[in-house]
């Protein structure tokens, strides 16, 4: 096993326990010559996309293809919709995330899971000048009481990204980082992303639950929406 495959396997092993058994998880390395996307997917890239963007996109689609097969479905393309979100095969919901060194996809049948979100971030501190845009005043108060505040600010960013993706398949609503406020349980590795305003079908005060793990150079977050018809 190459060093790249070893760290990818380590990252997948860290994230797998955060997900229920009915959620498929797969990953790929953008730096390890990922397989070419399917033609319908390549058509979604802009003609002037740089090599880095093409490799990350290819790795994300490779992970998505693996997840589709893990659910026992035939391989199908995952193009990009007009809203820039992945267009999943009928009957499933999922999410893709990538960094410069890793791509992962999660996928589940939508009769059990109505929304899924995953986000990967390099384990580096969030830049201070981004704090007001990412974190609410209450979240910034919480950060001031924590060790490694920069890392935890990046965790807030990642968790909001995962929760946004999970809710988007139902709400189709765009909003900023102030649209959710986090309650984080560091000891349990979990969070609740609470809506600060109504985003039908979600009410103000309703929450999207999620989990996180930090290791192998990444901050990794996942969120799920279940129990909605």
Image (spheres, rainbow, N blue to C red):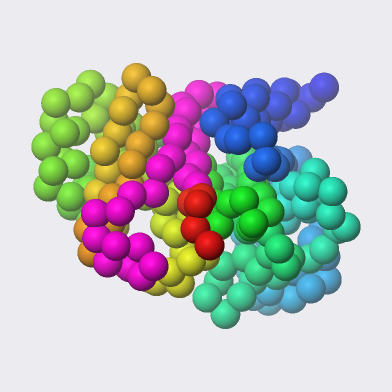
Q: Which residue of the protein is positioned furthest toward the bottom in this rendering?
A: 82
Q: Decide: is 58 above or below 198.
A: above
| Residue 147 located left or right of residue 48 | left
| Residue 133 located left or right of residue 80 | left
Q: Is residue 66 magenta?
A: no
Residue 53 appears in view: yes
Q: Position of residue 21 (x, y in %)?
A: 67, 34
* Residue toward you, 87 or 128: 87
The residue depicted at 36 percent of the width and 70 percent of the height is: 200
| Residue 93 located left or right of residue 118 | right
The residue depicted at 50 percent of the width and 32 percent of the height is: 218
Q: Position of residue 194 (x, y in %)?
A: 28, 50
* Residue toward you, 127 or 86: 86
The residue depicted at 45 percent of the width and 59 percent of the height is: 167
Which quadrant of the figure has residue 192?
top left
The residue depicted at 27 percent of the width and 43 percent of the height is: 182
| Residue 173 located left or right of residue 66 | left
* Residue toward you, 205 or 37: 205
Residue 130 appears in view: no
Start-end of magenta stretch: 198-224
Q: Decide: is 182 above or below 170.
A: above
Q: Decide: is 67 above or below 229.
A: above
């Amino acid at each position: 096993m190459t060093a790249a495959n070893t760290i990818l396997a380590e990252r997948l092993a860290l994230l797998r326990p955060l997900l229920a058994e009915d959620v498929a998880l797969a990953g790929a390395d953008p730096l390890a010559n990922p397989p070419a996307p399917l033609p319908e997917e390549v058509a979604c890239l802009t003609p002037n996309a740089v090599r880095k963007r093409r490799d990350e996109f290819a790795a994300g689609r490779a992970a998505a293809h693996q997840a589709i097969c893990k659910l026992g479905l035939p391989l199908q393309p995952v193009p990009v919709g007009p809203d820039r979100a992945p267009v999943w095969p009928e009957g499933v919901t999922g999410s893709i995330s990538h960094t410069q060194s890793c791509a992962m996809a999660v996928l589940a049948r939508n009769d059990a899971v109505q929304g899924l979100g995953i986000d990967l971030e390099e384990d580096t501190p969030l830049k201070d000048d981004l704090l007001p845009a990412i974190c609410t005043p209450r979240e910034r108060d919480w950060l001031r009481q924590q060790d490694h505040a920069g890392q935890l600010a990046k965790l807030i960013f990642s968790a909001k990204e995962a929760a946004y993706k999970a809710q988007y398949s139902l709400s189709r609503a765009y909003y900023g980082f102030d649209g959710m406020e986090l309650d984080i349980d560091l000891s349990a590795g979990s969070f609740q992303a609470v809506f600060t305003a109504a985003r039908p079908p979600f009410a103000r005060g309703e929450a999207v639950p999620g989990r996180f793990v930090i290791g192998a150079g990444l901050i990794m977050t996942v969120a799920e929406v279940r129990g909605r018809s």
